[in-house]
Image (spheres, helix red, strand yellow):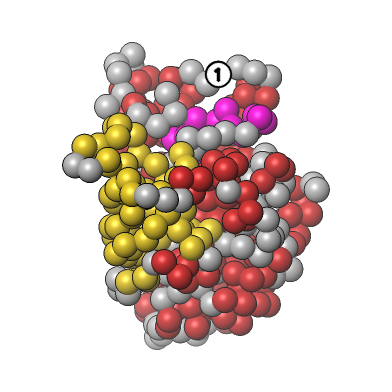
Amino acid sequence: MQADQFVAKTEALAPVITAHADQAERERRLPAPVAAAFAREGLYRVAAPRACHGHEADPLTQMRVIEAASRIDGSAGWNLMIGIETFGLVAPGLATCPELIEDPLVVMASSTAAVGRAERVAGGWRVRGQWQFVSGIHNASIFGATVRLFDGDEPVDAVNRYAVVPAENYEIVDTWHVSGLRGSGSHDVRIDDALVPDERIIVTLGGAVGDGPLGRIPLGTRLAYNKVAVALGIARAGIDAFMDLASAKTGRFSDRKVRERPFAQRALAMAEARLLGVRASVFELLASHWDKIVAGEKLTARDRALFQIVCSDAVLGAADAVDAIAEAAGTTANQIGHPLERICRDVRVVRQHFTVAPHHIEDGGRVLLGLPAQGLMLAGLGN
């Protein structure tokens, strides 16, 4: 399937996503009909290997799909992004238990935000722990819990793994009390005492790769570009909303439409310039890196540093664009119920995510100057 077809499938879901966006905001979770639509159209599995019932779409296609969903609704886009990452990075590790994802409607969630304990017992492993930031967990039927294996009081080794647990063996803990991306449903998951058989203890995020070029992308790179896509989609939705507002709203103490104000004109122009610029830089560099990977080349430390820099700057740029138009929109951008109010909250959450946080820009600069990286994104993931 071509990239445009995946994007068209995503855009065609706009009515169902939009119809449930306010419900997602109220309930702090993605409504089931939206998740079911993503699964039905095969969008969660865009990046999964074909051997794992996926499409193995290239990185730019993944970004365009996530961007399209996020333009409709940020929380829905975030959920789709997490699903794409989960199936793309975890599905290859399910070779010992492929029956768990044979049904195309199965949704999987996972978390690396904490490390639980798995103790060796007869028949497998007893798992317990609590994991944070499990986006989309309400729609998942299986959960990948990061654990460390123990035999008695002794750790088996120093390697983290996933314990893959069905929904009946875990509890969703209501912890996602936030302002931005409320509908992502990134609650905690608690497991008190679940027996997990050996075949469902698998390698953790990115630990198993398929035979194709997607498996050769450094993990840090892969975790960064999809977050960028969410921010780009949200910011584009912000510009869309501002265009509508500027054509309809007459400013207070004025007889002119907002669009006639020079300040608004400049704000829109600068927002477009910033957003188009960061999008182009990420897409161009990702395309170049993808060509190298397909050709069998390995990305250099400089390649990875440059890409991390443009990814972190891209989410800053998306937030900058939204800030500019929100200022020009006046108090309307702060009114609950107006699209810009939610968009302003949502885009800032992406900027705060560890994988694209602004402090990585400095670490990337270190690498460009010939110094060793210090942060996890460049020094740890994917080397």
Q: x%, y% of residue 325?
A: 45, 64
Asked if one can make out residue 125 in the rendered structure from this viewpoint, the answer is yes
60 versus 269 height, above or below: above
Residue stretch in magenta: 211-225
Q: Nearer the viewer, residue 336 or 179?
A: 179
Q: Residue at x 49, y 23 (%)?
A: 303
Asked if one can make out residue 223 in the rendered structure from this viewpoint, the answer is no
Q: x%, y% of residue 185?
A: 42, 69
Q: Residue at x 41, y 49 (%)?
A: 124
Quadrant in which the C terminus is drawn: top left
Q: Is residue 371 left or right of residue 165?
A: left
Q: x%, y% of residue 167?
A: 47, 67
Q: Is residue 216 magenta?
A: yes
Residue labelled with disc 1: 298
Q: Nearer the viewer, residue 283 or 374?
A: 374
Q: Is residue 329 left or right of residue 50?
A: left
296 versus 96 height, above or below: above
Q: Is residue 246 left or right of residue 251?
A: right
Magenta-drawn stretch, dominant element (helix, strand or loop): helix
Q: Is residue 256 magenta?
A: no
